[in-house]
Image (tube, rainbow, N blue to C red):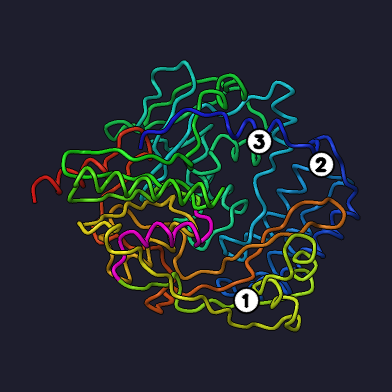
Amino acid sequence: MKKKLTSSFLTLVLSTGLLFSQNFDKKSILSDLDFLHNSLEKTHYNLYAYTDKKAFTKNYLEVKKSITHDSLNLLQAVTVFQQVISKANTGHAEIDFPISAYKNYALNGGTVFPLEISIEEGNVYIRKNFSDNNNLQVGGEVVAIDDIEIEKIIAKIHPQLSAETPYFKNAKLEFWSFPRLYWQVYGRKDSFTISIKRAEKVIDIETSAVDLINDFEMKRSEIITSNRFLKFYETSAYLKPGNFNGDENAYKAFIDSVFSEIKTKNKKTLIIDLRNNAGGHNEFSDYLVSYFAEKPFKWNSKFTIKTSQTLKEQTRLNNDTTDLYFKEILEHENGEIYEYPFENYYPQEESKRFAGEVYVLINRHSYSMAAVTAAMIQDYHLATIVGEQTGDFPTLYASQFQYSLPKTKVTIKVPKGYIIRPNKKELKQGVIPDIFIKDHLVDEKDEILKELLKRIQKN
């Protein structure tokens, strides 16, 4: 789908404080590794939901044994810690891409692999070409890099990514960007032999790396977009609500104005686009849904929290402990799981609501609350869900909080809560669309919207 070029990730990179050149001795790394392993059992809602304890411990010991150098820099440390936490196979138990290491590399003339990729049904396609080699055409199938099969390269990158399924790991790989992750795992390379499949033949194409800042970050756009806007297509209104975060009052004012304008245009169909959406808070998404719901609704059938000493410490540091939600975290025993009930959310008054047909667009990059909201809309039969399966589950371990490792200060993110979708089903899968339309390459060609509009016009 079409996105505005942005260097927002580069802005984040250049504003990051920690330096890649920072080194930690082996003793500190092993100490933090032990702390990570032990703390995950206490803080994660259910560490062994998607991998058994024996497999998780075996992986931890193997990672620990792999540390043979006397010291590791921050990039190496993050890479090691990611390989432990990702074994939980929980999307919300994660360590982010090492931005501070990337910053140092960028400022010291770093180069990266020149192609963004899209992973679809086991095949890898060129999504963006930042090189000056015109033989590397968008849509071309990549089968190998430097004589290493692309499947093996992706398998080597997967341990740096936390997700419930390989499908979701591949979505996160697209999200974080293949060139960045390829650099993290393989280090700097200034030239590549890329094997491309054409008409059942494999052709090797030589190409150079590109400058990280000027020829990659400054020319690309992130998959996730926070843009909020409304536009119209003949009989349809199209709403991109953006991520469910930021200034809540400003967001609600935007939604108010949107539905007021839709009313004046007298459109019969509303299309809400939750693709490439990072999610956020239910106060935002509930307000949006209230404009086309006909009866009270709730974004979950059950929400439970596991409290811990670490969660309590972070709650005291970062939250308003007079608020009932955070107050209850402090009042329950460490390790206790308890239910926190959410009240029903009520629709807007009938005169304000949209009464026509509603469609909601999703894809593999509809994350967290975006996926949960799509599931709620589906379960309450408020709209037709269109697109492709989400990577994130709508019944999931989420409500993420974070803390730091003692020695390296690397940030750990873990889920303290378990959310069950409104229909009470606990299936281990993403939101399944009512109408499946493939989002090929996640690029400027918007196959999902185009096909939906075609179908609407036929009806």
Residue, x 17% and y 50% (percent of image)? 268
Q: Which element carries disc 1, helix, strand or loop?
A: strand
| Mark 2 vs mark 3: in front | 3
Q: Earlier in the sequence, mark 2 or mark 3?
A: 3
The x and y percentages for residue 351 are 27, 59
Q: Which residue is mark 1?
A: 305
How far apart are the two marked residues, 3 and 1, measured between alpha carbons?
A: 31 Å
Q: Is residue 442 above or below residue 390?
A: above
Q: Earlier in the sequence, mark 3 or mark 1?
A: 3
Q: Give percent across and percent down for residue 426.
A: 44, 76
Decide: few, some or many residues near mark 1? Use Cα within 10 Å; few <14, some 14-19, many ≥20.
many
Query: Magenta region: which residues?
Result: 279-294
Mark 2 vs 1, N-terminal side = 2
Q: For the point 46% across and 52% down, which residue is it?
A: 252
- The crowding category of the residue bearing disc 2, from other C-alpha atoms within 10 Å (few below 14, some 14 to 19, many at least 20), is some
Comparing labels 2 and 1, the label whose residue is closer to the camera: 1
Q: Is residue 93 above or below residue 19?
A: below
Does residue 26 sit above or below 347 in this rendering?
above
Distance from label 2 to label 3 (Cα)? 21 Å
Q: Position of residue 350 (x, y in %)?
A: 28, 63
Q: CA distance from mark 2 to mark 1?
A: 35 Å
Q: Is residue 207 left or right of residue 268?
A: right
Name the residue carrying label 3. Answer: 12
Q: Nearer the viewer, residue 285 or 205?
A: 285
Name the residue rendered at 52%, 29% in the picture.
Answer: 6
* Residue corresponding to mark 2: 73
Q: Neighbour class for label 3 at 10 Å: few (<14), some, many (≥20)?
A: few
Callout 2 amino acid: Asn
Q: Position of residue 312 (x, y in %)?
A: 77, 71
Query: Which residue is depicted at the point 31% across and 31% down?
Result: 198
